[in-house]
Image: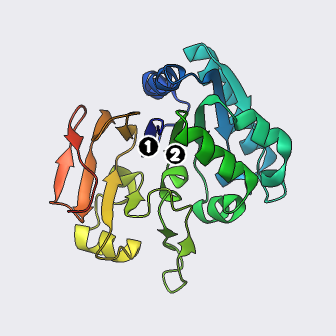
Amino acid sequence: MNGSLALVGSGEYLPAMASLERSLIDDALSNGKQPTYIQIPTAAGRESDARLDFWRELGQAQGQRIGVQSVHLPIYTRDDAFKQEHVDAINDSALMYISGGDPHHLATTLIDTPVWSAIVSNWSTGGSLAGCSAGAMVLSSQIPNFRFTKNPPTPGLNLLPDIRVIPHFNKFFKWIPDSAAKVLMHAPNDAILIGIDEMTAIVKRSGAKHWVVVGDAKVHILKGLPNQALHDGQEIDLRLT
């Protein structure tokens, strides 16, 4: 039984997203997981010490806000992703939150590591998994290079191989035509391309068949399914037809 899965456009650890994060923890508790909130800050691993401290403190404040233990795992390099103490912390945790930053660094750090195996194993037995911004992008089969468009894409973690996510959609992509967004994402014909606005998520609850939009703004279906914009509470089947 897979746990709940959330793809978030932005807003990890912020008060406005606390109810979503609490609900993901509750989903996992009902599946027998332990009330721990795991922060996985790998995507920010190349940022300054001050920024890393900022993300750690922000996540810890959110844990206190929603009443669970927050565990920050300093997984910044591939060596870190092989450490047994990080694997042990992930096992049976209620929520594993992969936060934002550089999706390419995130993917190359976690791919084919014990930490990633532990994340998948815990999710497949009922733990909740959330990926925000870069953390949502890496769950696909590939990650395009926005800044260096001639460079080949980076292999993703392949949990959702047919889904490609554009986070922060209403901030960075609202002025770009949908056709241009498709080109930037190098989305193949057999993929579903979605744009997720800031402070918004799309969630597949444990045991559910459909995804549901949660948040202040919209989720945009750009390719692979009929084009549409979905609001809070609306559901969709994100499977290729």
Amino acid type assigned to the residue bearing label 2 in the image: Gly
Considering the numbered disc 2 on the image, is that residue within a helix, a strand or a loop? Answer: strand
Residue ID for mark 1 = 8
Res 217 seen here: no
Q: Residues within 10 Å of mark 2 (few under 14, many from 20)?
A: many
Give the residue at the far top of this rendering: 67
Seen at 65% across and 24% down, the residue is: 36
Res 136 seen here: yes
x%, y% of residue 39? 66, 36
Q: Is residue 225 left or right of residue 190?
A: left
Seen at 33% across and 51% down, the residue is: 170
Q: Residues within 10 Å of mark 1 (few under 14, many from 20)?
A: many
Residue 216 bears which disc, if any? none
x%, y% of residue 205? 38, 34
Distance from disc 1 to disc 2, alpha carbons, whole Å, reads: 6 Å
Residue ID for mark 2 = 131
